[in-house]
Amino acid sequence: MPEICAEYIWIDGTKPTPQLRSKTKILTFGETPPIWSFDGSSTNQATGNNSDCVLNPVFICPDPIRGDDNILVLNEVLNTDMTPHETNTRVQASKIAEKYKTHESLFGIEQEYTLLDPFTNAPIGFPEEGFPEPQGPYYCSTGASWIFGREMVEEHLEMCLDAGLTISGINAEVMPGQWEFQIGPIGTLEVSDHLWIARWLLFRIGEMHGIQPSLDPKPVSGDWNGAGAHTNFSTKTMRENYQAIIDGCEALSETHKLHIKNYGEGNERRLTGLHETQSIDQFTYAVSDRGASIRIPWQVVADKKGYLEDRRPSANMDPYVVTRLIVETVCSDLPQ
Ligand code: ADP
Ligand code: MN
Ligand code: MN
Ligand code: MN
């Protein structure tokens, strides 16, 4: 029987922001990826004297890096008694997705990120000393004076497509070296699984280019845009009726603090009220307003139906947590 490589990927226990880890298991072609284990004492998930943690496969896709029949296997982490590990945020997201499945929630997540030089930790495109030309020309631009890292970004897009992920676009962002890709619109659990794999591919492809991607919410302080993960959300009712979108915004206005607490570490450096953000301690929603916490796109007003954009989550947020909270907040107010 031919052998294949299965790259087992999981989310670790690094604080404050978890990192992705992976290792390779050889399987025979056609074999269902079994549970596996790892040394949790090396990933901030266990102590040395009781170090075993369990990898439980939850999502499988083609491996676009190794190609052929090789696969990527995303895992949730369990304890050895098969209960969810405390770092396993997927299990709760899965329960909530199931509980509110009749609402047919859809998510589209805009993942912003910054490409760094791994030796200087400065964004690529920043000079050795001082700063580049101020923001203005970079967003969605073309030209070697403004665009840095496109080759890697294009490769990432191609690999996401080859992996079968639901990726809906890419664009150059407002700061040099800063980019975005969008996953969705797909369901609550799927969007998070796809986003974690897309993040892993980004870091993995960065290795081949000598570039370290960063999901830090504010990689350069001062007059430079931070990096967010705008989370676009709709229920079946919102896709049919504008009032349901307003009701969703109103529901979100009541749980602002809870959401902010769970929308990414260091987000206070980004949500300042400047650079297309609302301040962290204020909640507003408005049409077309990139300074609001929630934006309702103009097209949604024109169509009188569609979705809302939660602009608060930071680039390093955990999508299992963010999508679960949005579904819980918005759908618990609606009739079942
Ligand atoms: P912008 O940069 O203008 O904020 P983008 O085009 O980057 O917007 O992202 C919009 C996102 O909205 C896309 O990821 C898309 O998949 C998502 N989206 C579109 N329609 C819906 C919908 N009905 N429900 C949830 N998400 C949606
Ligand atoms: Mn966008
Ligand atoms: Mn953006
Ligand atoms: Mn956006």
Image: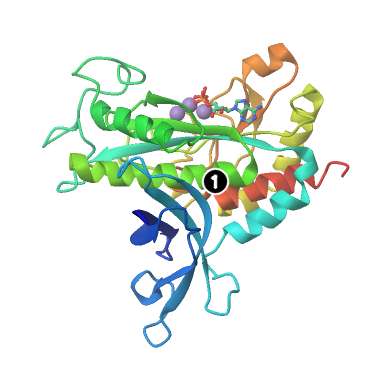
Q: In this view, which residue lies farthest toward the left?
A: 128
194 left or right, relative to 247: left
Q: Is residue 334 visible?
A: yes
Q: Which residue is mark 1?
A: 192
Is residue 45 positioned above or below 148 on the image? below
Percent of width and height locating residue 128: 11, 37
Q: Secondary structure at mark 1?
A: helix
Residue furthest top in the image: 302
In this image, 144 relative to 85: left or right?
left
The answer to which quarter of the image holds residue 244 is: top right
Q: Residue at x 48, y 71 (%)?
A: 54
Can residue 256 be seen here? The reply is no
Q: Residue reaching furthest right?
A: 335
Residue 280, by quadrant, is top right
Decide which of 129, 138 is in the foreground and name it: 138
Asked if residue 191 lies left or right of residue 316, the reply is right
Quadrant location of ligand 3?
Answer: top left
- Cβ of mark 1 under 8 A from ligand 1: no
Looking at the image, how many numbered discs can be counted on the residues?
1
Q: Position of residue 211 (x, y in %)?
A: 22, 42
Please rate how many residues cluster around mark 1, counting C-alpha atoms within 10 Å: few if below 14, some from 14 to 19, many from 20. many
Q: Measuring 57% from the left and 80% from the top, which residue is drawn there?
A: 81
Residue 227 sits in quarter: top left
- Relative image position of residue 258 (x, y in whole percent): 64, 53
Kindly identify the amino acid type of the residue bearing the numbered disc 1: Ser
Q: Position of residue 231 (x, y in %)?
A: 57, 36
Colour scheme in use: rainbow
Q: Quadrant of the C terminus?
A: top right
Image quarter where the N terminus lies is: bottom left
Q: Is 300 on the left-hand or right-hand side of 279?
A: right
Residue at point 70%, 11% (across, down):
302
